[in-house]
Image (cartoon, helix red, strand yellow):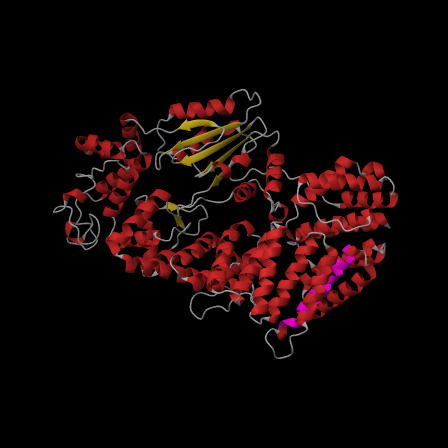
C-alpha cells in the first residue's frame, strides 16, 4: 500500500489540510491527521506551524510507513476518502461599471496596455496607477478593464480598500481574504493564515489570464503578496495620493488639459449648458484644475442651474441669500462674496479642487442637508444609511433618507456596492466635511452627534446579537427600544451588513471616551466570529477593546469576555501563542471577578486551543478541569441552567482528546453519552457533531460496521445546507467501507 502514499502526496495533503482548516469540518480533517500521526510515530506530535515543519513531519511519517504497512494503508484511505481539494477560479461579478463621462487619458491607457501585453520575460505584470484625490485613478482603472475585457478571459477581480476614516486600511491577510472571496472561495475553504491564503491565491491564478485591481491601496505591504507569479495575470494597484515603493510600472494620472476638461463637461452637463457659461469658462477650468471629480461636480451644478435657473429666494429651502445657501446658515454670498464658489472662488496658496467642489456642492444644498452630512462625516463610517445619518443629525430616518438622496445628486456621496440604500463618502470628501463640522456647528454639537450615532449602532448591534444567539449568556438581552429581528439568520445578516461600522465604532467610542459603549459594541461582535467566521474583520476591534478593558475595567467580567473573544478569534486564525495568552487572561479575569461559569468556559477554550494544536494530553486536562469548575455551580446559582449542556459539551471534548491519545474505549463512552444528551434535548446539530466524533473513534477502533451506523444517523440529522459536514461524512463512510 506504500506506493499510494508517496512523500510528495503526503506532504501536499498535510499542507493543504493545514491551509484549508477553516470551519468545523476543516478542523476535523486536521484532528484525524493528528491522531493518525500520533499512532504512526508512537508519540505526541504538536502541530507544525509552517511549510518547512510540515515537510519535515511528512518525511518522518513516510519513513515510518515503509516499516508499517497497516499504517500506510490507513494513510492511503484517509487521503483517498477526502473530497478533491482543488478549487476552480470562479469569475466574479467583475469590475464595477466604467464611467460614461470618461475622457482622454490615452497616454495612461497606452502605458497600462503596454504593461499588460509586453513579453513577460520573467517579470511580473504589475502597474501602480496613482494621482491626487479626485483626479480619476479609479475611473482609469475601470475604463482600462472595460476596454481590454477580452484580454482577461479568466476573470477580472476588484477589491476596494477605501477607508473613509483616514486610517491605514486592512492588513495584508485581510486583503487576501477579500480577494479570495471575489475569486469564489467559500468560507469553509478559506485558509485562516496569511501564508495559506497567498498559496491559494497563487494556485488559483496559476496559468490564468486575469486582471486583479486593488483600489485605494495605502501601503506596499497590502499588495506585495498579490504580485503575480504567472505571466498572464496583471495586478493593477490604484493609489489615491502619493505612490509608494513597489516594484511596478508607475503610471501617473495627470490632470485633464483644458481641451479635454471642456469635453468632459459637455459629456456630463450637456453642450448647451457648457455654451451658456462660455464667458466664465476660463475661471471654471482654473478652479477645477483638470480634476475629474471637480469637473463632474461643476457639471452637476450646471445641470441644476438649467433645471432651476431663477430660484425662488422667498422659499426657506430655495437656496436664496437670506437663508444661508451660500455656506453655513446665516452667511450671505452677496454680502460675503469671498464665499461664492462660482464667481469668487477662494484663492488658496495651494488649490485643492476637490475641497472647492465639496464646498460648492454644500453651498447648493439645503442647510439642514449640509448639516447632516457634516455631522455624519465625523465618525468616518465605512457605510451610511438613513438610520445612522438620522441619528447623527437627530432627524427622523425618512427625512434623513431624502437628505442622503440630495447628497448623492450633488456627488457628495457614492452608492455603496452593498446596496440596501447605503452610501459611502469618498475619503477626501469626508475629510473636508469633518474638518468644517466644528467651525460650522461647534464642538458640543459635534460631540453630541457622534454620541447619537454610537448609540444608534449599539442599539442595532445589541438587537441583532441577541437575535443571532438568543440563548447565549455572552450576548446582552435586547434593549427595550429599537427594532427587534425575527430570527438567528436575520440577526447575523444585520451584524454582517453593519460590520464595518461596528468595528469603526469601537475605535470612535474609545477616542470620544465612550468607554462602556466601546466595550459593549465589541462584545456584540461575538455572533459574527462564532457563527459567520469574520475573524480578520473583528480582530482590530477586539484588540482595542480588550486593551481598553484592561485599562478601565481591569480583571472584570467585561475584560474576561473580551479576552475570551480575542483568544477565540486568534485561535481560529492559528495564532496559537497569542490565543493561549488571551485565553489565560480570560481565565484570570473570570476567576478574579468570581464568575464561575465564565471561568469554566475560558478553561474549556484553552482546552480547544490545545486540541486543535494536537496537544491531546494538555487538552484533556483542561477539559476535565472545566468539567470540575462547572460542577461547582449549585442549583439556583448563576449559570445553573447552562450546566447540563456545558457538561455534555465537556464530555464531547474529552472524548475527542481521548481519541487523539489513543484511549478509544473511554472516548467511545463519553461521546455516546454526549450524543444521547443532545438527542434528549432535541439538539440535532450538536448530536450530529457528537455522532461524527463517535464514528471517527469507532473507525480508529476498527469497529467499521458500528461506525457506519453512526454516520447514517448523523447524515439524517443534517439539513442540505450543511454541505461541508455531509461531504466529510461521505469521506468517513468511504474510509469505513474500505477499511472493513
Q: Nearer the viewer, residue 614 or 734?
A: 614
For this view, does 7 lie left or right of residue 578? right
Residue visible at 63% across and 75% down in the picture = 640
SS assignment for the magenta stretch, majority? helix
Q: How many marks?
A: 0
Q: Residue at x 47, y 59 (%)?
A: 548
Q: Relative to the observer, which residue lies in front, 341 or 100?
A: 341
Residue 439 counted in the magenta span: no
Left or right for 190, reference 8: left
Instruction: Answer above or below: position of 682 versus 38.
Output: below
Pick the front one: 732 or 490: 732
Q: Residue furthest left?
A: 335
* Residue 679 drawn at (x, y percent): 72, 67
Residue 241 % position (x, y): 38, 36
Picture coordinates of residue 315 (x, y %)?
A: 18, 54
Residue at the image point whose x is 32% and y is 37% from the top: 293
Residue 270, placed above or below residue 324? above
Is residue 553 visible in the rendered image? The answer is yes
Q: Which residues are magenta?
A: 642-660
**How far across and down, in percent of the image, does residue 659 sit?**
78, 57
Residue 647 is covered by the magenta coloring: yes
Of all residues, the one furthest to the bottom in this rendering is 636
Q: Quadrant of the N terminus?
A: top right
Residue 531: in sight, yes or no? no
Amino acid at each position: 500500500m506504500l506506493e499510494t502514499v508517496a512523500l510528495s502526496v503526503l506532504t501536499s495533503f498535510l499542507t493543504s489540510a493545514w491551509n484549508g482548516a477553516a470551519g468545523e469540518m476543516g478542523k476535523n480533517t486536521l484532528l484525524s491527521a493528528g491522531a493518525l500521526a500520533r499512532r504512526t510515530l508512537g508519540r505526541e506530535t504538536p502541530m507544525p506551524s509552517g511549510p518547512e515543519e510540515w515537510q519535515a513531519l511528512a518525511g518522518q511519517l513516510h519513513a515510518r510507513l515503509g516499516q508499517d504497512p497497516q499504517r500506510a494503508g490507513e494513510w492511503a484511505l484517509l487521503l483517498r476518502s477526502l473530497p478533491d481539494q482543488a478549487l476552480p477560479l470562479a469569475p466574479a461579478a467583475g469590475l464595477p461599471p466604467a464611467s460614461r463621462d470618461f475622457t482622454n487619458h490615452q497616454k495612461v491607457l497606452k502605458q497600462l496596455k503596454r504593461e499588460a501585453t509586453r513579453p513577460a520575460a520573467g517579470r511580473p505584470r504589475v502597474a501602480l496607477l496613482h494621482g491626487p484625490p479626485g483626479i480619476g485613478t479609479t475611473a482609469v482603472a475601470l475604463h482600462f478593464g472595460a476596454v481590454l475585457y477580452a484580454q482577461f478571459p479568466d476573470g477580472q477581480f476588484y477589491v476596494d480598500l477605501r477607508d473613509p476614516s483616514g486610517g491605514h486600511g486592512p492588513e495584508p491577510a485581510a486583503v487576501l481574504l477579500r480577494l479570495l472571496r471575489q475569486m469564489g472561495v467559500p468560507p469553509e475553504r478559506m485558509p485562516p493564515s496569511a501564508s495559506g491564503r497567498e498559496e491559494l491565491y497563487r494556485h488559483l491564478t496559476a496559468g490564468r489570464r486575469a486582471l486583479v485591481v486593488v483600489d485605494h491601496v495605502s501601503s506596499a505591504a497590502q499588495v506585495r503578496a498579490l504580485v503575480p507569479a504567472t505571466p498572464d495575470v496583471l495586478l493593477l494597484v490604484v493609489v489615491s495620493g502619493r505612490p509608494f515603493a513597489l516594484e511596478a510600472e508607475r503610471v501617473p494620472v495627470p490632470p485633464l488639459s483644458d481641451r479635454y476638461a471642456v469635453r468632459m463637461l459637455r459629456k456630463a452637463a450637456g453642450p448647451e449648458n457648457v455654451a451658456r457659461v462660455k464667458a466664465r469658462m476660463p475661471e471654471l477650468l482654473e478652479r477645477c484644475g483638470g480634476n475629474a471629480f471637480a469637473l463632474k461636480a461643476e457639471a452637476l451644478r450646471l445641470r441644476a442651474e438649467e433645471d432651476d435657473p431663477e430660484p425662488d429666494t422667498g422659499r426657506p429651502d430655495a437656496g436664496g441669500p437670506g437663508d444661508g445657501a451660500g455656506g453655513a446658515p446665516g452667511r450671505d454670498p452677496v454680502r460675503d462674496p469671498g464665499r461664492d464658489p462660482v464667481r469668487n472662488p477662494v484663492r488658496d496658496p495651494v488649490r485643492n479642487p476637490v475641497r472647492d467642489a465639496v464646498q460648492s456642492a454644500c453651498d447648493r444644498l439645503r442647510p439642514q442637508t449640509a448639516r447632516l452630512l457634516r455631522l455624519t462625516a465625523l465618525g468616518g463610517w465605512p457605510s451610511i444609511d438613513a438610520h445612522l445619518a438620522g441619528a447623527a443629525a437627530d432627524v427622523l430616518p425618512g427625512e434623513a433618507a431624502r437628505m442622503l438622496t440630495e447628497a448623492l445628486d450633488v456627488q457628495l456621496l457614492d452608492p455603496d456596492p452593498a446596496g440596501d440604500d447605503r452610501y459611502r463618502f469618498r475619503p477626501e470628501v469626508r475629510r473636508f466635511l469633518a474638518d468644517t463640522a466644528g467651525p460650522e456647528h461647534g464642538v458640543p454639537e459635534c460631540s453630541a452627534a457622534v454620541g447619537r450615532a454610537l448609540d444608534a449602532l449599539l442599539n442595532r448591534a445589541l438587537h441583532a446579537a441577541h437575535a443571532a444567539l438568543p440563548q447565549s449568556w455572552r450576548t446582552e438581552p435586547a434593549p427595550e427600544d429599537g427594532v427587534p429581528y425575527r430570527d438567528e439568520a436575520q440577526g447575523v445578516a444585520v451584524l454582517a451588513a453593519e460590520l464595518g461600522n461596528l468595528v469603526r465604532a469601537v475605535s470612535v467610542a474609545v477616542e470620544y471616551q465612550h468607554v462602556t459603549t466601546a466595550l459593549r459594541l465589541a462584545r456584540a461582535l461575538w455572533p459574527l466570529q462564532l457563527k459567520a467566521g469574520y475573524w480578520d474583520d473583528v480582530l482590530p476591534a477586539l484588540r482595542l477593546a480588550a486593551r481598553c478593558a484592561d485599562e478601565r475595567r481591569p480583571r472584570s467580567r467585561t475584560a474576561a469576555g473580551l479576552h475570551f473573544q480575542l483568544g477565540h478569534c486568534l485561535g481560529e486564525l492559528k495564532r496559537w501563542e497569542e490565543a493561549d495568552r488571551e485565553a489565560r487572561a480570560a481565565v484570570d479575569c473570570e476567576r478574579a471577578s468570581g464568575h464561575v461559569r465564565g471561568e469554566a468556559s475560558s478553561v474549556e477554550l484553552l482546552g480547544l486551543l490545545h486540541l486543535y494544536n494536537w496537544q491531546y494530553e494538555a487538552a484533556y486536562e483542561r477539559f476535565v478541569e472545566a468539567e470540575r469548575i462547572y460542577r461547582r455551580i449549585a442549583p439556583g446559582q448563576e449559570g445553573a441552567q447552562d450546566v447540563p449542556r456545558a457538561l455534555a459539551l465537556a464530555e464531547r471534548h474529552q472524548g475527542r482528546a481521548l481519541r487523539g491519545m489513543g484511549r478509544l474505549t473511554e472516548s467511545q463512552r463519553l461521546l455516546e453519552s454526549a450524543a444521547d444528551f443532545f438527542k434528549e434535548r432535541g439538539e440535532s446539530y450538536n448530536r450530529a457533531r457528537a455522532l461524527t466524533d463517535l464514528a471517527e473513534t469507532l473507525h480508529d477502533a476498527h469497529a467499521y460496521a458500528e461506525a457506519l451506523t453512526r454516520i447514517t444517523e448523523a447524515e439524517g440529522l443534517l439539513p442540505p445546507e450543511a454541505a461541508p459536514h455531509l461531504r466529510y461524512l461521505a469521506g468517513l463512510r468511504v474510509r469505513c467501507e474500505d477499511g472493513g
